[in-house]
Image: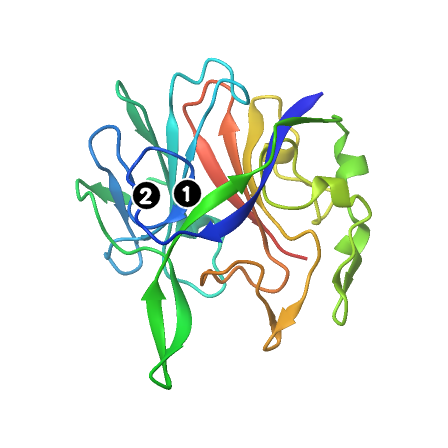
Amino acid sequence: MLLKTQFQIVETSSPITEPINKFGGQPVWVNTPHWPLDPATGKQMTFLSQIVLTPELFPDSQGIIVYIFFGEGEPLYNEAFAVVLQNKDNVSMNTHVEVKFITEATGPSLYELEIIDEERQWVAKEYQLAQESIIEEEGLPLLERYDDANDLDYDEGYQFSKPELAGNKIGGQPFYIEGLDTPPEYFTADQWEQLLQLAPTEGFWNNLQPNFYPFKMELGEFGILNVFITKDYKRAEVYIQTP
């Protein structure tokens, strides 16, 4: 059995300055800041989230926090993301050698499009996680976590065959919507486990594009974001699934 906690993304009215799970705002570093630069532009990437590895879900993780960033691109692709792992004793980054880091503590973050004084404006936002209790999830082989053609309908959106594997969650196991011939190692290799999944429990359309998150993050049509971490907690990688 695998453990997971599902969550909703809820806007907060005040900055989060503690090292807890959150999206947007500014990272709460517990070691030297390492802000990644977008290889395409040389500018600071956008801060997406920080996720704390708790011993309940990730035994022997030693207080590691995972910081996730993304660069420019529409839609975003796997290499557009960078990940920093750190606790008070160590710092490590993901393995994309073309990504450089600077010791800036603050930088670009998430935003929403709002109407202010009858004008459309991008407004910076920060979100806390409304987390559910930790529960067990039955371990299933990849074939049983697979949605054939991912059961998508352009009128109805997502209609997952196993909705219990869908949704936003920390831990647990990912469902899979791409080809079964050559699935990425993150979904099959013993050394990897799921850290984070961003996915809807059901889909809907907004101006001919799906909008499953309150903030701007272009993952393409029906895009699903999975973050995987090695069981020694030294590497983390982002993988975007698209049909």
Q: Quadrant of residue 166?
A: top right
Q: How many marks?
A: 2
**Label 2 Cα neighbours within 10 Å, binned few <14 / some 14-19 / many ≥20:** some
Residue at (41, 43) in percent of width and height: 22
Circles 1 and 2, Cβ within 8 Å, touching? The answer is yes
**Residue 220 image point, x, y percent:** 56, 63
Between the C-alphas of marks 1 and 2, the distance is 8 Å
Identify which amino acid the numbered label 2 is placed on: Ile
SS for callout 2: loop
Residue at (27, 61) in percent of width and height: 41
Circle nearer the N terminus (1, 2): 2
Identify which amino acid the numbered label 1 is placed on: Lys
Say which residue label 2 marks.
Answer: 16
Q: Residue 142, which numbered label? A: none
Front in this rendered view, residue 66 or 189 = 66
**Residue 66 image point, x, y percent:** 39, 33
In the rendered image, the quadrant that contains the C terminus is: bottom right
**Residue 176 image point, x, y percent:** 70, 44
Say which residue label 1 marks.
Answer: 22
Is residue 95 visible in this depiction of the protein?
Answer: no
Q: Quadrant of residue 90?
A: top left
Residue at (40, 51) in percent of width and height: 12
In the rendered image, the quadrant that contains the N terminus is: top right
Which residue is most to the top?
Answer: 60
Q: Is residue 128 left or right of residue 92?
A: right
Is residue 200 visible in this depiction of the protein?
Answer: yes
Q: Quadrant of residue 35?
A: top left
Q: Is residue 6 left or right of residue 85?
A: right
SS for callout 1: strand
Which residue is most to the front?
Answer: 13
**Residue 127 image point, x, y percent:** 42, 50
Q: Is residue 134 left or right of residue 78?
A: right
